[in-house]
Image (cartoon, grey):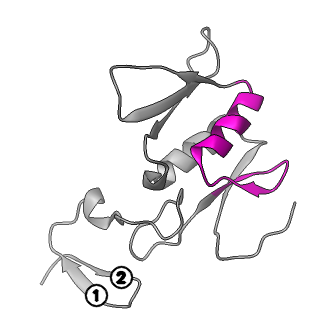
Amino acid sequence: MSGVWVFDKNGVARLITNPTRESFEQKDPTYPGTATAPGARPRVLVYLPSNQVIRSYTELEQRLTELGWTRYRNSDHPDLIQFHRSDTSSDLISLPKNFANFKHFHLYDIVLKNRPFFQVRDPTKRFQEA
């Protein structure tokens, strides 16, 4: 038997014979707005100035607006919510319309484009302000 063994949250293993990224993605994340896959640690986005865990688009949009980002209306991609810095900048953040569908690369895209303001953390660990 070749493939990848994946354990769910109850400890039950299943064999994925032809693994793809989609086969590892968890359909119902434990924590909304986290990036999780079976066997992977969940992650949350933290706004560093207030040490706030971002749990909704309302919170995220408020923080991004404070940092100079604007909601970008794009009718070509109705399944995405996009933010851009300015008309002269090529910086664009594209996120799934459903906040519960955030993946790790969405979280890190926000962090990369706003380094001093956001961080990705493990929600199960207690964290302290740096």
Q: Position of residue 70 (x, y in %)?
A: 63, 22
Q: Is residue 13 above or below residue 46?
A: below
Query: Which numbered disc flags the more N-terminal residue, 1 or 2?
Result: 2
The disc placed on residue 50 is none
Q: Is residue 76 above or below residue 116?
A: above
The residue pinned by badge 1 equals: 13
Seen at 46% across and 55% down, the residue is: 100
Instruction: Say whether residue 49 is left or right of residue 33.
Output: right
Q: Position of residue 94 (x, y in %)?
A: 48, 34
Q: Position of residue 39 (x, y in %)?
A: 42, 77
- Please name whichever residue, 51 or 6, is drawn nearer the observer in this view of the structure: 51
Query: What span is in magenta?
Result: 45-68
Q: Amino acid at mark 1?
A: Ala
Seen at 66% across and 52% down, the residue is: 54
Element at label 2: loop
Q: Is residue 114 visible?
A: no
Is 48 one of the magenta-colored residues? yes
Q: Is residue 35 above or below residue 73?
A: below
Instruction: Say whether residue 91 is left or right of residue 50.
Output: left
Q: Quadrant of the C terminus?
A: bottom right
Q: Is residue 118 visible?
A: yes
Distance CA(mark 1)–CA(mark 2): 6 Å
Seen at 43% across and 40% down, the residue is: 97
Seen at 35% across and 27% down, the residue is: 77
Q: Quadrant of the N terminus?
A: bottom left
